[in-house]
Amino acid sequence: MGIFATRAGHPWHAIIPLALAACFLVTCNGGSASNSPPISHTPPANVGSAYAPICPGTTPCASLGSAAAYHSGTSHPAPTGSVTIGDWESPDSVSPLFADQQVDFTILHAIMGNCVVAGADLKWLPDECSAVPTQANGDVSADGTTVLMKLLPNLKWSDGQPLTAADFVFGWQTLTNPKTQAVNVGGYSVITSVTAVDAQTVRVQFRAPFGPYLTYLPFALPQHEFKSLTPDQFTASAEVNFQPQATSGPYMITDYMLDDHFTLAPNPNYTSASFYGPFLKTLTFQIFHGRQDEIDAFSGGSLTLAQDFGPSDLAALRTATGGKLATTPAIGYEHVLYNQANPALAKVAVREALSLAVNKCAIIQQVLGTPCASSVATSITAPQALDFDSALPAMTTPDLTKAGSLLDSAGYRKGSNGMRVGANGQPLHFTLVTDTATARVTAANLLAAQWQALGVAVTVKTYPGTKVFADFTNQGLLATGQFDIALLAFVGSADPDFTFDIYHTSAIPSQTNPGGTNYGHISDPTLDAALQTERGTVDFTARVAALKQVQQRVVAQQFDVTPLYVWPLLTLTTSALHGYIPGPPLDAWDWNIADWWAAA
């Protein structure tokens, strides 16, 4: 899925939009409709969130009837109260065409709806659609290539104009037109056609069965507002990027100043199958010029919620006053990555030895200051992920004896100075590359000391995040392979398919694949086959089985990476905020912003 942001000083990569592999489903997967397995009429395990919102006044929203019925009613309490959300970054764009960083998506969720939304439990809910399309309910064809999006009746844009299937067709056509230069094309390119069956039904035709299809259902753009624009005019349009006049989410932008604020008001025509709001009279996004400024503003009482932080901010966050610090495990993992283009690191025994020498708990204590058991990463996804393999060992106790034996067997024995040398007499030495974030530097130095005890010399080199994480074209150190070992985090989306574009051979970055994120140059036919199986079916049970094979292969068999800790989602909130249920994907932490409300 490609990196959606490479941000100076932000020590993670988020895998959101899909960068499709050169070897795709039709050629890698085989299979045809005639061989499709029998369809189960039981909803898949990734559909049907247990979301049970509480409306203002501590009333269970379900007591008001279904969300769709509630919105179709004629009498609703007027929105009241206000919430101010802080961020230390200014949006590049709040359009689904160009959003590419966390703050962009945060505002985007407040102003635009979708056919479906993933809940905090990572299970899909209907939003603008009346149901989540699945094979079980007949909205996905037996061969997995055709999806019907059945829209709620009487959908409207915030300006009162009808929101119909034609707007979804327009959205997909605009997104995939090369002249638009959209950022988030990825998985939408797997779609061969989007057509309006009628005003409330959209037919989406995929080239082949596509596992993460729910992530890439087309979104609507207001055709009546933007039809006069040519595709090449979208990228420079302030109306498109910062203040659309027609929105479909719970709020609409009434005022903004770049690098300062965005002010939102309730959308009077909002409708959803799962959310009951909007409940706020005013929703403001306040932009600051640094993380500490944002934290200080929260302590000073001018913010209801402060967010967009990482482990390096923990010390400052713990000193904040006026609210509480919430730590939620994100769908992501801090890890050690081995560059297998290095001849020594191409040996499984060397990678396993380095993994066995790592003291994860010591790193967690120094970097996070949290109990090891609650933060340790055992896999390449988080424990709450629906595909998480709980059978993987935690590997929290270093085993230097076994690690030493593995290195001996690989031909790297200790010399008279206690450091290991190869058969050619050259020392076993690696360069560890990472960015300059405080937490990252601390962890890197701890790792170097732990490997030193094994007799392996490691030099730590730190660089600005823009240099480390830039793509191949821009000579990023990871993308161009200018490292032996790297320390980084990958943060994924609700659908577990994001692993494909980190570990599949076709994702190795190169001049012809500059956006590739398989920085470790991992090329493993067994791993590739499991990843292709996962991506090439809409059967979620089969996908999970394949993804568990992927986790076992990467972590416990080939030792392609050493997971360290689960990436934390960190927010400061006041007691005035209600309804906030953080979502594990960092691109959708505010997934239920429609149902937030403020105490009087």
Image (cartoon, rainbow, N blue to C red):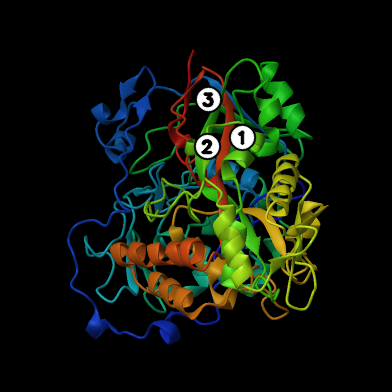
Residue under numbered circle 2: 372
Return the x and y of residue 279 as percentages of the image width and height.
Answer: 45, 27
Q: Dot 3 surroundings within 10 Å: few (below 14), some, or many (20 or more)?
A: some
Q: Is residue 460 visible?
A: yes
Label 1 with label 2: CB-CB less than 8 Å: yes
Q: Dot 2 surroundings within 10 Å: few (below 14), some, or many (20 or more)?
A: some
Q: Is residue 518 visible?
A: no
Q: Quadrant of residue 340?
A: bottom right
- 317 or 394: nearer the eye? 394
Residue under numbered circle 3: 281
Return the x and y of residue 114 as percentages of the image width and height.
Answer: 44, 52
- 333 or 323: nearer the eye? 333
Q: Which mark is residue 73?
A: none
Q: Amino acid at mark 1?
A: Gln
Q: Amino acid at mark 3?
A: Lys
Residue under numbered circle 1: 365
Gap in angstroms between the C-alphas marked 3 and 2: 42 Å
Q: Amino acid at mark 2?
A: Cys
